[in-house]
């Protein structure tokens, strides 16, 4: 699914976040220490190689909603933007912190002249954020941020599984 909003393409696809060679940057659903971890962070760190963790060390720790950028190392992408999503029910206000992840990642991308960026469904795995609510928060944050972007031209949600994709597509229909 794809919409164009204020000249920026916003896409929802099912796929593997580390297999997006046409994107300049992918977003890591990171942990505070920017270490390998599981889920998306584990997949990105494994694909990027040990240089990514070495580059991340001096940038850690990060706080919920914060975004930092590194090079992509062995990934086909030039950069990785690392965001720490909120742990649902613990980090509050969860909706503001989750929206900050998307807003701050897009701001960092734009500042670094990134033209295309891929997001996973931040905080919806081990951090327990309800999928429907997370999709709405993410797409609203993107819609609010797009008018402030000058370099980013493509925003792609790269989602694992049919259910996750369908929830995001419904949210996109509601918001755009």
Image (spheres, helix red, strand yellow):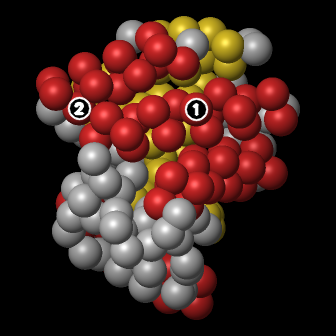
Q: Secondary structure at mark 1?
A: helix
Asked if 79 appears above or below 136 in the picture, the reply is below
For marks 1 and 2, give the CA distance.
17 Å
Question: What residue is at 34 percent from the left and 63 percent from the top?
Answer: 88
- The answer to which image quadrant residue 70 occupies is bottom right
Residue 105 pos. (x, y %) = 62, 52
Between 76 and 16, the residue placed more toward the observer is 16
Question: What residue is at 80 percent from the left and 34 percent from the top?
Answer: 149
Q: Quadrant of the C terminus?
A: top right
- The answer to which image quadrant residue 37 occupies is bottom left
In the picture provided, is 64 more to the left or to the right than 42? Answer: right
For label 2, the crowd category at 10 Å Cα-Cα, with few meaning under 14, some 14 to 19 and many 20 or more, is some
Between 108 and 138, the residue placed more toward the observer is 138
For label 1, the crowd category at 10 Å Cα-Cα, with few meaning under 14, some 14 to 19 and many 20 or more, is some
Asked if 61 appears above or below 23 in the picture, the reply is below
In the picture provided, is 59 more to the left or to the right than 169? Answer: right
Residue 162 pos. (x, y %) = 15, 24
Identify residue for label 2.
Answer: 164
Between 150 and 84, the residue placed more toward the observer is 84
Q: Does residue 5 appear in this view?
A: yes
Between 51 and 157, the residue placed more toward the observer is 157
Q: Secondary structure at mark 2?
A: helix
Mark in front: 1 vs 2:
1
Dot 1 or dot 2, earlier in sequence: 1
Residue 129 pos. (x, y %) = 31, 54
Question: What residue is at 45 percent from the left and 11 percent from the top?
Answer: 173
Question: What residue is at 47 percent from the left and 47 percent from the top?
Answer: 26
Identify residue for label 1.
Answer: 140
């Amino acid at each position: 699914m794809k919409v164009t909003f204020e000249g920026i393409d916003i896409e929802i696809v099912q796929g593997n976040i580390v297999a997006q060679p046409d994107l300049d940057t992918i977003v890591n659903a990171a942990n505070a220490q920017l270490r390998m971890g599981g889920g998306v962070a584990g997949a990105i760190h494994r694909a990027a190689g040990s240089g990514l963790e070495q580059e991340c060390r001096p940038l850690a720790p990060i706080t919920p909603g914060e975004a930092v950028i590194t090079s992509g190392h062995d990934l086909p992408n030039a950069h990785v933007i690392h965001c720490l999503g909120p742990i649902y029910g613990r980090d509050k206000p969860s909706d503001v912190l989750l929206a900050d992840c998307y807003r701050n990642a897009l701001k960092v991308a734009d500042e670094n002249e990134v033209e295309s960026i891929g997001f996973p469904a931040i905080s919806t795995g081990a951090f327990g954020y309800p999928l429907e609510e997370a999709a709405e928060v993410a797409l609203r944050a993107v819609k609010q941020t797009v008018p402030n972007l000058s370099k980013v031209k493509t925003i792609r949600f790269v989602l694992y599984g049919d259910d996750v994709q369908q929830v995001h597509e419904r949210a996109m229909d509601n918001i755009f």
